[in-house]
Image (cartoon, rainbow, N blue to C red):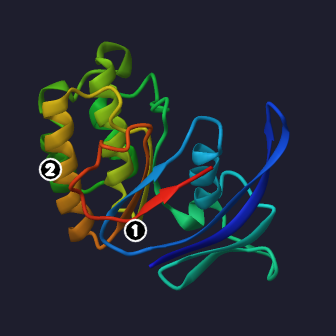
Amino acid sequence: MISIDIEKKLKAYKGVQVLRVKKEFATGGIARITGPSGVGKTTLLKMIAGLITPDAGRIVVDDITWFDSAQNISLSPQQRMPGFVFQDYALFPNMTVQQHLEYATKDTAWINRLLNIGKLETFTTHKPEHLSGGQQQRLAILRALAIKPKLLLMDEPFSALDVKMKGELISDLQSLIKELKATALTVSHNPQELDGVSGDELEVG
């Protein structure tokens, strides 16, 4: 179970707005986070990951307090260790596909399984500049999964994928999330993108 009850002041076109989120997410699903542009969906993911500090509130993941403003608790991103798929992928330009995954884990069998899921088995020696946008996006997802996180945070993770690849990858992700007893929180501008997928939904804004 993931329990989030936080707020953060955000700079907006019309001055300052306050992002308030109070929500519980059940373990084992892929939850959708939707809402208009500029309301703080990406900021929410970064606050959960520990990259941005909320102004107030609590974040509790699997009974471990990640953040509590009243108790002055704020675990570092390295202590929280979520898998994070950034909207711009944030890949290392000088690392090959294989090196990206080996940087996250030494489990060869797990790496090979991820490569198979991402359809990147024949691209292991390629660096990001030699991959298509869709391949880079898939690599970003695989790298986030490589650490076998209990919480997977994904910011527009399927935007560069065609319908067939997206459907296959989401299906595989559902299986992996259940296997790892993890939870995925997915920011999406397309509310229909995860139709039929088990998981909670949060509308921000």
202 relative position to 143: left or right = right
Give the residue furthest to the bottom. Answer: 63
Observer able to see residue 120: no
Q: On the image, which quarter does residue 129 sit in?
A: top left
Of helix, strand and loop, which one carries label 2? Answer: helix
Mark sitting earlier along the chain (2/1): 2
Asked if the residue under mark 1 is in contact with the one under mark 2, i.e. CB atoms within 8 Å, the reply is no
Front residue of 87 and 119: 87
In the picture, measured across the screen, residue 194 lies left or right of residue 22, that is: left
The amino acid on which the numbered mark 1 sits, given as a three-letter code, is: Lys
Return the residue found at the far right: 15
State the residue position of label 1. Answer: 150
Q: Judge whether residue 77 can be spotted in this image.
A: yes
Closest to the observer, 19 or 130: 19
The structure residue drawn at horizontal position 29% and vertical position 35%, both measured from the top left corner, is 138
Tag count: 2
Quadrant in which residue 150 is drawn: bottom left
Q: Which of 21 and 65 is in front in this view?
A: 21
Residue 11 quadrant: top right
Tell me where residue 164 appears, x and y as whole percent: 13, 32
Question: Which residue is under mark 2?
Answer: 113
Q: Position of residue 121 (x, y in %)?
A: 13, 33
Q: Distance between the residues labelled 2 and 1?
A: 18 Å
**Would you call the spot at circle 1 few (<14 residues within 10 Å), some (14-19), or many (20 or more)?**
many
x and y percentages locating residue 93 in the rendered image: 45, 22
Amino acid at dot 2 = Arg
Looking at the rendered image, the quarter that the N terminus falls into is bottom left
Query: What is the x, y in percent for residue 112?
Result: 15, 46
| Viewer-nearest residue: 24 or 65 | 24
- Left or right, 39 with respect to 95, comes to right
Compared with 94, 18 (above or below) is: below
Element under disc 1: loop
